Amino acid sequence: MPDIQHTVAFRLVHAPGSPEEEAFLADARATLSAIPGTADFAINRQVSAKSAFAWQFTMRFADEAAYAAYDEHPAHVAFVRDR
């Protein structure tokens, strides 16, 4: 069973329900979940009025080495840099 859970909370510049929002989330799912070692990738909507963030990515990794490989993977680096 994976023992590291990585989460990212964020908000988008795109309007809620817009094609741009949908494209961003679809690109994130396709890109990030395909990186070797990534398990249980999920996109969650944040609904609490107490948070400024609207979305969360969550994923699991078997160990520190798997997470480090994900963090350094060119697809992850490019996604964070470009998106």
Image (cartoon, grey):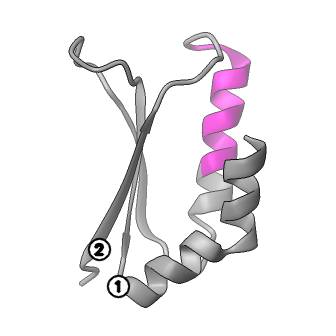
- Residue 44 lies left or right of residue 1; in this view the side is right
For residue 4, which numbered disc appears in the image? Answer: 2
Q: Is residue 37 visible?
A: no
Q: Which residues are magenta?
A: 17-28
- Residue 52 lies left or right of residue 82; in this view the side is left
**Predominant secondary structure in magenta?**
helix
Identify which amino acid the numbered label 1 is placed on.
Ala
Which of the marked residues, 2 or 1, is nearer the chain's N terminus? 2
Q: Is residue 26 magenta?
A: yes
Q: Is residue 57 above or below residue 75?
A: above
Tell me which residue sits at (46%, 33%) in the image: 10
Q: Secondary structure at mark 1?
A: loop
Q: CA distance from mark 2 to mark 1?
A: 6 Å
Dividing the picture into quarters, in which one does residue 55 lie?
top left
Tell me which residue sits at (63%, 48%) in the image: 28
Q: Is residue 82 above or below residue 23?
A: below
Tell me which residue sits at (35%, 85%) in the image: 62
**Disc 1 marks which residue?**
62
Residue 46, position as x, y percentages in the image? 32, 27
Q: Is residue 78 above or below residue 34?
A: above
- Residue 21 lies left or right of residue 41; in this view the side is right
- The answer to whether marks 2 and 1 mark residues whose Cβ atoms lie closer than 8 Å is yes
For residue 79, which numbered disc appears in the image? Answer: none
Residue 70, position as x, y percentages in the image? 56, 74
Identify which amino acid the numbered label 2 is placed on.
Ile
Q: Residues within 10 Å of mark 1 (few under 14, many from 20)?
A: some
Q: Is residue 5 visible?
A: yes
Q: Residues within 10 Å of mark 2 (few under 14, many from 20)?
A: some
- Residue 33 lies left or right of residue 82; in this view the side is left
Q: Is residue 21 magenta?
A: yes
